[in-house]
Image (cartoon, rainbow, N blue to C red):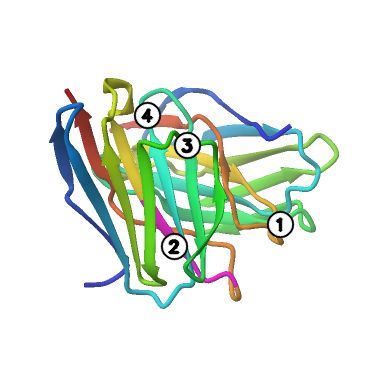
């Protein structure tokens, strides 16, 4: 695997379900990001992790819970979501010491019924 | 202050024509301005980026023009090809910060054969 991978690619869940999104970066980067992409809206930053420490939470509801066990893996735990949370969730990574470029994964298309 | 405004929302160009997408920002602390290209089912990928110490950057058929005094920057795609049909996002960030990217709303480009 190369670059940034995300699993699953598609997820359908009910409002009472609990699920997790996984992101893995194979680039040796030290920072990882979660973004939400909704139709007709700009990409919204959700969380930033730098060297496994959360450095930014962009006023995200508590029904979204991030976890970063190491610099290569990032999870987004989901529980009691709302239909308006349906969106494409994108993970990105970056080498903060070398460049400003963020490398994105393909995203997880989430549908909340 | 944190917004990046992008226009137009959609653009149709004939093959061989020039595609122009514009962005404007307010925060003068921004010092990194990337453009991302996104194809359906894929995550955004860096296309080209510029810093405010130069007024223009060219990579192949893609050029960024940057006007620091007007707080505007634009993407020009010369000799547009059907394969360029995608959604384009401008963004801005402060390098010394967490790398948080503020994205524009996106422009859907269709290049007709």
Q: Earlier in the sequence, mark 3 or mark 2?
A: 3
Q: Give the camera-side residue of A15 and A71.
A: A15
Q: Earlier in the sequence, mark 3 or mark 4?
A: 4
Residue A86 located within the stretch drawn in magenta = no
- Residue matched to label 2: A93
Q: Give the camera-side residue of A30 and B58.
A: A30
Left or right relative to A79: residue B73 = right
Q: Are marks 1 and 2 in contact (CB under 8 Å)?
A: no
- Residue matched to label 1: B51
Q: Residue placed at 20% from the left, 26% from the top? A: A15
The majority secondary structure of the magenta stretch comes to strand
Residue B32, given in percent of the width and then of the height, sits at 67, 54
Rounded to the nearest angstrom, the CA distance separating label 1 from label 2 is 20 Å
- Residue matched to label 3: A60
Please, which chain is the residue tagged with disc 3 on?
Answer: A
Rounded to the nearest angstrom, the CA distance separating label 1 from label 3 is 30 Å
**Circle nearer the viewer, 1 or 3:** 3
Q: Quadrant of the C terminus of chain A?
A: top left
């Amino acid at each position: 695997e190369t670059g940034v991978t995300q699993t699953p690619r598609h997820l359908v869940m009910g409002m009472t379900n609990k699920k997790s999104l996984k992101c893995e970066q194979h680039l040796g980067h030290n920072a990882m990001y979660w973004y939400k992409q909704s139709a007709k809206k700009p990409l919204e930053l959700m969380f930033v992790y730098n060297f496994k420490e959360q450095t930014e939470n962009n006023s995200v509801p508590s029904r979204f819970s991030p976890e970063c066990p190491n610099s290569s893996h990032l999870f987004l735990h989901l529980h009691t979501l709302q239909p308006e949370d349906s969106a494409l969730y994108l993970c990105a990574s970056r080498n903060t010491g070398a460049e400003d470029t963020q490398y994105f994964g393909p995203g997880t298309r989430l549908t909340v019924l | 202050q944190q917004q990046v405004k992008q226009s137009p929302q959609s653009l149709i160009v004939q093959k061989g024509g020039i595609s122009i997408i514009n962005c404007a920002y307010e925060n003068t602390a921004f010092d990194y301005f990337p453009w991302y290209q996104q194809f359906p089912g894929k995550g955004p990928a860096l296309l080209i980026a510029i810093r405010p110490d130069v007024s223009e950057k060219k990579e192949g058929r893609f050029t960024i023009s940057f006007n620091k005094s007007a707080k505007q920057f634009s993407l020009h795609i010369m000799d547009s090809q059907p394969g360029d049909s995608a959604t384009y996002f401008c963004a801005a960030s402060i390098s010394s910060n967490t790398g948080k990217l503020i994205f524009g709303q996106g422009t859907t480009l269709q290049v007709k054969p």
